[in-house]
Amino acid sequence: MAKTEIYSDPVYNHPPARLAETEIYSDPVMASETRPIVGVIMGSTSDWETMKHAADVLERFGVPHERRVVSAHRTPQWMAEYAASAEARGLEVIIAGAGGAAHLPGMVAAHTLLPVIGVPVPGRALNGLDSLLSIVQMPGGVPVATMAIGAAGATNAGLLAVAILAATRPALRDRLRAFRQEQAERVRQATL
Ligand code: RP5
């Protein structure tokens, strides 16, 4: 994949080009990864409109990931199994989005040692403030890295996952550095 293909447009201003699964796994930067290393989960299919922004970032950086609906309330047993088995299955970070009584990120964090990034999804009644307060107010001892409400939060969840993974993957770190530089350059070049 050419560098220009990866960085040609800002993550949040244009719909990024989606990589086919085969392209993700043949990406030279992530070539040694043979299975998903990030889990992008959400409480409902209705959360996808927001959570796709996290998946878009992971695709852009060529990070192998899986996307699943895992509900803390509707499938509590499956949620516990998913979280408890995540590390053994090779996941290194979990991004969890939920709206309303948003218990998914915290309950997943309670069942795994992996870093969990929470995304408050804007709901129909309270615009996501309810989700934000639910996700962010974890008791000391079980952290969830809570992002902003909505699309910006989902984008940043993807970028934070990349930053965590990049701590031990120099090539991915280079890619993240280039992304930041190009983002800064776009701001410098902006005309009104
Ligand atoms: C939460 O309930 C989900 O994360 C979703 O944001 C919200 C509403 O779900 P649906 O009724 O749209 O399935 O658990």
Image (cartoon, rainbow, N blue to C red):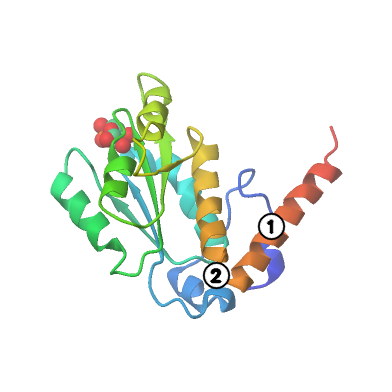
What amino acid is at disc 2? Thr
Residue that appears at 83% across and 40% down = 190
Q: Where's the C terminus, which quadrant?
A: top right
- Residue 179's label in the rendered image is 1
> Of tags 1 and 2, which is closer to the observer?
2
Q: Position of residue 144 (x, y in %)?
A: 40, 43
- 170 to 127, vertically: above or below: below
**Which one is in front, 79 or 24?**
79
**Which one is in front, 23 or 92?**
92
Residue that appears at 27% across and 47% down = 110
The answer to whether the beta carbon of the residue marked 1 is less than 8 Å from any atom of ligand 1 is no
Q: Which residue is mark 2?
A: 168
Residue at the left extreme? 77
- 37 to 103, vertically: above or below: below
Q: Secondary structure at mark 1?
A: helix
What amino acid is at disc 1? Phe
User: Residue 39 occupies which quadrant of the picture?
Assistant: bottom left
Q: Position of residue 68 (x, y in %)?
A: 30, 53
| Camera sees residue 44 | no
**Which one is in front, 163 or 64?**
163
Q: Residues within 10 Å of mark 2 (few under 14, many from 20)?
A: few
Instruction: For ligand 1, give the image quadrant.
Output: top left
Q: Position of residue 106 (x, y in %)?
A: 31, 41
The answer to whether the beta carbon of the residue marked 2 is less than 8 Å from any atom of ligand 1 is no
- 33 to 80, vertically: above or below: below
Residue that appears at 38% across and 73% down = 35
Q: Earlier in the sequence, mark 1 or mark 2?
A: 2
| Camera sees residue 187 | yes
